[in-house]
Image: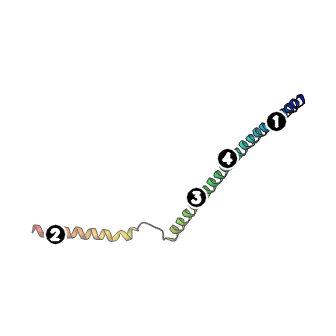
Amino acid sequence: MEAELASLQAALARVKKAKVLAQAQIETLLVEQKALLAKRDADIQQMRRTDEREAFVRAAQDAQAAVEAAAAVVASQPPLVPPSPQELGFLDEAVEEADELDELEDFLRNN
């Protein structure tokens, strides 16, 4: 009976030792899992930053292309310059003729 009890106690000691080793392995695996999750989150954040940076660069390139296209359109059109005084001379003549007509109408009304 004592031999059987000693055998059972030895088996219990082996089971307890195996349990301690298993718990230590579980703790190690949990630490590794946390580290892997943290690395995954950091990688995801880095990918987002890279995507945002690339989107910003593409937007800047698109804006630059739009500016260059607008500049090309403006450059292809004739320059806008104010009319010369000679070109505006016909307005002076039209004003003078209108004044003469007004004077003539006033004269005809009064006489």
Q: 47 or 55: which is nearer to us?
A: 47
Q: Position of residue 6 (x, y in %)?
A: 88, 30
Tell whether 17 sits left or right of 83: right
Circles 4 and 2: CB atoms closer than 8 Å? no
Quarter of the figure that contains the C terminus:
bottom left
The mark nearer the N terminus, 1 or 2, is 1
Which residue is found at the position 14% from the left and 68% from the top?
Answer: 107
Which residue has dot 1 on it? 15
Mark 3: amino acid = Ala
Q: 76 or 45: which is nearer to us?
A: 45
Q: Which mark is residue 41?
A: 4
Which residue has dot 2 on it? 105
> In 3D space, how far apart are the residues under numbered discs 3 and 2 (Cα atoms)?
67 Å
SS at mark 3? helix
Graded by Cα atoms within 10 Å as few (under 14), some (14 to 19) or many (20 or more), the crowding at tag 1 reads few
> In 3D space, how far apart are the residues under numbered discs 1 and 2 (Cα atoms)?
127 Å
Which residue has dot 3 on it? 59
SS at mark 1? helix
The mark nearer the N terminus, 4 or 1, is 1
Mark 1: amino acid = Val
Q: Which mark is residue 55?
A: none
The mark nearer the N terminus, 4 or 2, is 4
Quarter of the figure that contains the N terminus:
top right
